[in-house]
Image: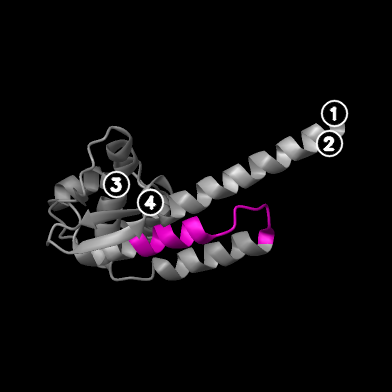
Amino acid sequence: ILSLRVRVGFQFRERERERERVMASTKKITLRSSDGETFEVEEAVALESQTIKHMVEDDCADSVIPLPNVTSKILAKVIEYCKKHVDSPKIDDRYVDEELKNWDAEFVKVDQATLFDLILAANYLNIKSLLDLTCQTVADMIKGKTPEEIRKTFNIKNDFTPEEEEEV
């Protein structure tokens, strides 16, 4: 009898968790970009952002959450990233991990301006995995390069005098 109760209790908890997951996935949150475009996303996707999560938890989120520091172009990319990471199975599977890493590698193949805007958005929205990914991408662009090559890559003007350059 105890074994049956434990099994039934476990099945009940599993069904309850599944119901909560379905309910959470069907709830929508509307985000407004700095240029006024609105995006309706599943709550689970929006809550990848700790900034949005805290706004929702603290009841600061009205019907539309304004994101004054993120353009619609960048917000669409951020939503794409969050959706992919929410939809990826959370299992310990090397194939799934490798597939997501490959997707991430393709995701950051963007022009520099977009990459830097993604860094700013990930920081503002507090999405650690996206911030780590985008910053690592920039670090990889710098790795093994001379200061002159780095300046050329990022179109940075050298404002050091020859004497200052010698000191460094």
Q: Nearer the viewer, mark 2 or mark 3?
A: 2
Residue 81 covered by magenta stretch: yes
Tell whether 156 sits left or right of 11: left
Task: Report which quarter residue 10 is drawn in.
Answer: top right
**Label 4: which secondary element:** helix
Q: Which residue is mark 3?
A: 125
Label 3 crowd (10 A; few <14 / some 14-19 / many >=20): many
Residue 148 visible? The answer is no
The reply to whether dot 2 and dot 3 touch (C-beta < 8 Å) is no
Q: Which residue is mark 4?
A: 43
Tell whether 26 sits left or right of 167: right
Tell whether 19 sits left or right of 36: right
Query: What kind of secondary structure does the magenta stretch mostly adopt?
Result: helix
Tell whether 43 sits left or right of 40: right
Give the numbered dot on residue 2. Answer: 1
Disc 4/disc 1 C-alpha distance (Å): 38 Å
**Label 3: which secondary element:** helix
- Could you tell which of marks 2 and 4 lies nearer the N-terminus? 2
For the record, the magenta segment spans 79-94
- Camera-side residue of 105 and 159: 105
Screen quadrant of the N terminus: top right
- Could you tell which of marks 3 and 1 lies nearer the N-terminus? 1
**Amino acid type, label 3:** Leu
The reply to whether dot 1 and dot 2 touch (C-beta < 8 Å) is yes
- Camera-side residue of 9 and 76: 9
- Could you tell which of marks 4 and 1 lies nearer the N-terminus? 1
x then y, percent, for residue 87 = 51, 60
Q: Which residue is mark 2?
A: 4
The reply to whether dot 3 and dot 4 touch (C-beta < 8 Å) is no
**Amino acid type, label 2:** Leu
**Label 2: which secondary element:** helix
